[in-house]
Amino acid sequence: MTVAPELSPAITVEQVTAVHGSGRQARTTLSPTSLSVSRGESVAVIGRSGAGKSTLADVVLGLRLPASGSVTVCQEHWCSATRRPAKRLRSLVQGIPQDPVAAFVPRWTIRRSIERAIRSLSRSAPDGLGEHPAGRDQAREHARDAEARISRAAELAHLEPSLLDKRVTEVSGGQAQRAAIARALAVSPTVLVADEPTSALDPRTSAEVSAALLSIVEDEGIALLLVTHDPEFAARCTRTVEITAPAGDPLTPAAPATASAA
Amino acid sequence: MLRNSSLLGAASRIVSAVALLLIAGALPWLSLRDPAASVLRARYAELEPTPEALAAVRAELGLEGGPLPTALRWWGGLLRGDLGESWISRAPIGPGVWNALGVSATLTVCAIVVALVIAAALVTPAALRILRDKPQRGSGPVGVALTSLPEFLLASALLVVVAVQLQWLPPYGWTGFKTVILPALSLGVPAGGLLGRLLTDAVGGVAEERWVNVWRLAGARPAVILGGALRRAAAAVIDQLGLVFIGLLGGAVAVEQVFAIPGLGRYLLGAANSQDLPALQAGVMLMAVAAALVGILTGVARRFLRGGPLPPGALPPPPEARGDGRAARWTAGLALGGLLLILVTGLPRDPYAIVHPRLSAPSMALPFGADASGRDLLARVAHGTIGTLTPSFAIVALAIVIGLLLAVLGEVARGPAEIANATPPILAGVIIAALMGPSVGGAALAVLWVTWPPLTTHAAALIDEARAMPHIRWLPLAGVSRFEIWVRHILPATVPPLLRHGMLRLPGVALALAALGFLGLGAQPPLPEWGLLLSEGIDYVERGPWTTVAPATALILTSVFAVAMAGLRRRRKASGARSGRPRAAEAAEDAALPV
């Protein structure tokens, strides 16, 4: 894949807020946040615990709808308070969870989980890649194509191919995190959201995984939104955005009003 | 997010309360057996049921205009203190039902005294162990044994043994202190056993809480610690206490019937059998008021014990008691073996053929003897197993399906669930029988009405747990549709535990059906059904006691099996907790089980 020079950002987050719960128990968990990330760029989101970093990651991934504001991906509407992400855009935005186990169905092999994603997402890919295969030849071609995508994704993520036929619970934490990266890359996303992808790993594995992730982003021209507590990892990103906890949050000591998004 | 809205829950409660009031008022109109026709028969036997005559009766009964005017007229009368007129005797209902209420109140107070004495006796050993600083979990076999017999079975047993065989006390009537003893025992012993077990488990668990050690280190006397532990344990079981007392109202129907006591329960049963719907309405109304009073008293007691309302989850649930696994497994196995033996030997025999001498005593050829018509009792009990268990399976399966559907809907089901939860099955059976006529289907409907709420609660907890699982939360990223997530990932994680829960409820469901059959509200003769067999046998208990022993044996084996299974469940749950099974669903399952 070549890096297309693009003027417009791959993803734009505009005045997004989030609310947990409903009625009297409703609680704002993300104060209005705006940011944008271009292809080949990596943006680190930092902030104290409870500032809403993981909530922001969930909103951008489309796992949670924002309370207000909207998210645009490749100049197309992605999600807002009233609209769920369209399925045809789904392959554009992928994620790497903090706990890699979340990316896989525990009773399936890693390969089956990745195949499942390729099958359902390439069918509705925006580049016209997949109308449902009509003939047997085409079906075979699609299977070959999926096989090639999986191999290439595993290679990019430095995942040993033999591990593809294990379940995610049977491999080590570092291997599982590489598998999660491979799963996300297999559907050729434009935007990658990583929620503390290295926090559960030991320092050396963490360094390897973060280096691999950053080089993939650069080489493949992917826009990376990285939620992290690790200052070193954040420093190696293109930019850093700090978000602060919503006002009235008991976790935040009375902060001066000037402290806002950098 | 709609599923968890508190607004929706409140709306659901209000709507179902209004619906309940309207239905209560419109009961006469809702009857499926045309009430006009039956009243016509009862009053003017010589009159032809022509359309004109029926219309005249309908107007006379106040049925014209449809359900809403009927309900409004009834409530209007009620507010003026007018309970209406009996359809059968045309006498005002007020005096009769007030008398019945007085009798029932006396009986209930006596039963509560019995229950409290038994509960205190059961909890004493655990309390003494705290005084000696050697707390121990578990409630022991006595409590289990006391809880295992449903009221109608215990009442029949006491009647046969104490009143008929030993002739220590009068077998029926309401003529003085001597006639109160047996009914109060029948009602109070199971309730006291259940209360005692709950309290003992709670006291044992409380004694292991950390504050006990803190108090001890601070030099508190054992008596002070015991006081604190009892209060904490009482706070933990106070809600169940309310349900136990409401359960007494339902059990009273069966006990009053067995001992021929002119209380509210028997009044209701009579009204249902003669289809005297205004009388039924008045009785149900009084029962509902009594249940509401119990609810208010429980709320006051809870406030006093816990010092005010707490947010949900603020008070940790008392720790689980460890059941004796091996004993429970043996007991369950033996009971099941006994039932299977009856089935295997009895199924090939003919339950309907009248070929033996009437009331033949048990012999090699007739192991259980013959009944009053000369039918083989072994065959009747064995076929009764099928007749009782088939509807039970259907009820449990339906309750699971309903539970899953309503759990998906969430808060919408809250109001009906709370009402259904507080309805004793016998009361539901009485109302349904009055509306539809007594039948197996009606009895099954009544038992289903009390079976679905706990399964719904459990299903909702399981679904919430499954939806919160990280890999299910992330499935949309792989392009998996919401429908597929529900069908292929959430439901498969939900159904197996629900099936297990349903199977655990099966014996209890069978006993509830038998109780309705015993009261004549379920299966009709000559169908072989356990409860019906027992009530047929009671009439001949002096000449042929075996007529009651045979069905009672099957019922007791089922009760023992049910209680032993509950013990097994606890053990499996303890091991499940170790392997990290989520807590919330377990708590729901726990709250759901009656034993």
Image: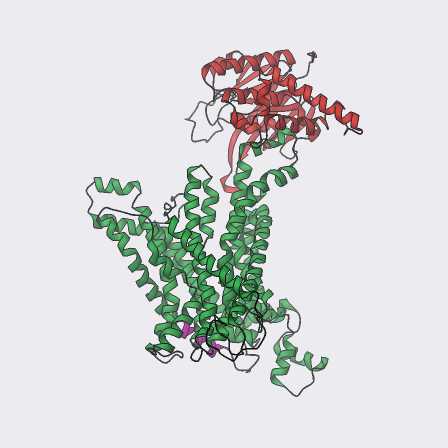
Which of these two is toward me, A43 or B213?
B213
Q: Does residue B577 appear left or right of residue B138 in this picture? A: right
x, y percent for residue B104: 41, 72
Q: Is residue B496 visible?
A: yes
| A22 is higher (above) or lower (below) than B594 | above
Q: Residue at x 60, y 20 (%)?
A: A182
x, y percent for residue B398: 59, 55
Q: Residue at x 50, y 70 (%)?
A: B518
User: Does the stretch in magenta take in B84?
Assistant: yes
State how the image is colored.
Answer: by chain
Start-end of magenta stretch: B83-104
User: Does the stretch in magenta take in B178?
Assistant: no
The C terminus of chain B is located in which quarter? bottom left
Give the green chain's letter. Answer: B
Give the red chain's letter. Answer: A
Q: Is residue B519 visible?
A: no
x, y percent for residue B98: 44, 75
x, y percent for residue A122: 71, 26
The N terminus of chain B is located in which quarter? top right
The image quadrant that residue A144 belongs to is top right
